[in-house]
Image (cartoon, rainbow, N blue to C red):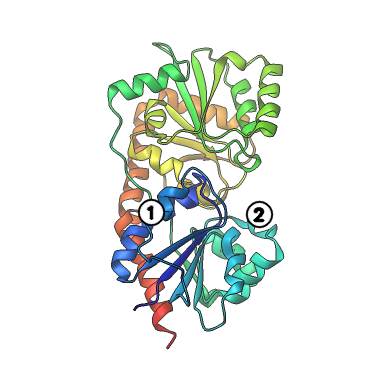
Amino acid sequence: MTPPLLVIAHEGTRSGGNRVLHALLGPVRELLGVPVAVELLAGGPMASQLRSLATASGPVGRPGAVLANSSLAARALLRFGADVPCAVYVHEDDEALTVLDEESRLAVVDRCRLVMCVSAAAATALVGMGVDPDRIRVVPPVITPRAVPGDAEVAGARAAMGAAAGDRLVVACGEVAWHKGPDLFVDLVTRVSDERVRFGWVGRRPLGLGRVVTGDLAATGGTDRVVWIGEVPDAAPYLRAADVVVSTSRRDAQPLVPLEAALVGRPTAGFAVGGLSELGAEGCVATVPYPDTVALAAVVGDLLEDAVRSADLAAAGARRARDRQSTGVVGRAVADELRRLMEAVP
């Protein structure tokens, strides 16, 4: 029997890395033509979806290869002998890589024969932490297109975010975590004086930081302008409901949301950090220097009034998503890299 490819995820949350894995695993499995086993180091709402993609049954003996999905799962590779080819798909940026635990860092630097990452900036960071450049391959994350939400879905999303007829809506999407800049989002709200502009944040809001940012918002008097939606299975209706999508991230190796927004026809504005700098240079998003919320508020205001520029940004983002980050393109790239990895070992 052909040894399986073992894929290890560090948890089953709806993180960008897990969404990419879920979209890729089926096509990669078919292209490789080998059984696939899936292991999660922790649970979460996507755990059953990820496990359902496995085709290998029963306990895994010696796998044909092991792929850790994210540097956070890389420590699990240390339990395999040197005869098992190991790879990692790094979705994190330079700051996240610098705070890796020692076992994960050791696995990424010394154990992996193949280190895939999502952007040129991430590749530079990996070289800086000691990874052999010859082992690194830049593979942008897959963007899975969804059906453009209908009018009823969009109306429901706007209503959920408190937007009445005539209001303009600015939406952020992602977990309320420090690296996503929810405090900068709150500051952005204070910089937009037009009372017709409403704001929404879609994504999981952990209790601790959630209390901090909602407390800050209350102190500024902006509570009635912002709705925190929480985690949803599909953010597309909320992105489509927005007039402008905003990213206040402090860091993000290669964000998914701006291109997902572009595919439903909406522009994104954000700070020129990580992969967002790359998207900005290509004209897919509007960027300003980090952490200039005054400049970001000005760009958001411009996009709310400039339908042509907004449409151009969305069109450029949608082209990139289709041409460079589709399931077919990225699935083929990942499958080819894994095939070479597996064939290199007798």
Q: Where in the figure is residue 311, as x and y percent of width and height? A: 34, 33
Quarter of the image for residue 210 reads top right
Query: Disc 1 residue type?
Result: Ser
Residue 154 placement (x, y as % from top left): 35, 23
* Viewer-closest of 320 and 75: 75
- 290 or 136, which lies in front? 136
Q: Residue at x 54, y 49 (%)?
A: 43
Local SS, label 2:
helix
Measured in 3D between alpha carbons, the distance from the residue under mark 1 to the one under mark 2, in whole angstroms, is 32 Å
Can residue 131 be seen? no
Residue appearing at x 42%, y 70% in the figure = 5
* Crowd around label 1: few <14 · some 14–19 · many ≥20 (10 Å): few
Q: Amino acid at mark 2?
A: Glu
Pointer 1 and pointer 2: residues touching (CB < 8 Å)? no
- Residue 4: x, y in percent? 40, 72
Mark linked to residue 95: 2
Q: Which residue is mark 1?
A: 52
> Quick check: 47 above or below 198?
below
Q: Is residue 244 visible?
A: yes
Give the position of the N terminus as an image quadrant.
bottom left
**Which corner quadrant of the image does residue 129 belong to?**
bottom right
Percent position of residue 177, x then y: 62, 39
In the picture, the quarter occupied by the C terminus is: bottom left
Q: From the viewer's perspective, is residue 133 above or below residue 203? A: below
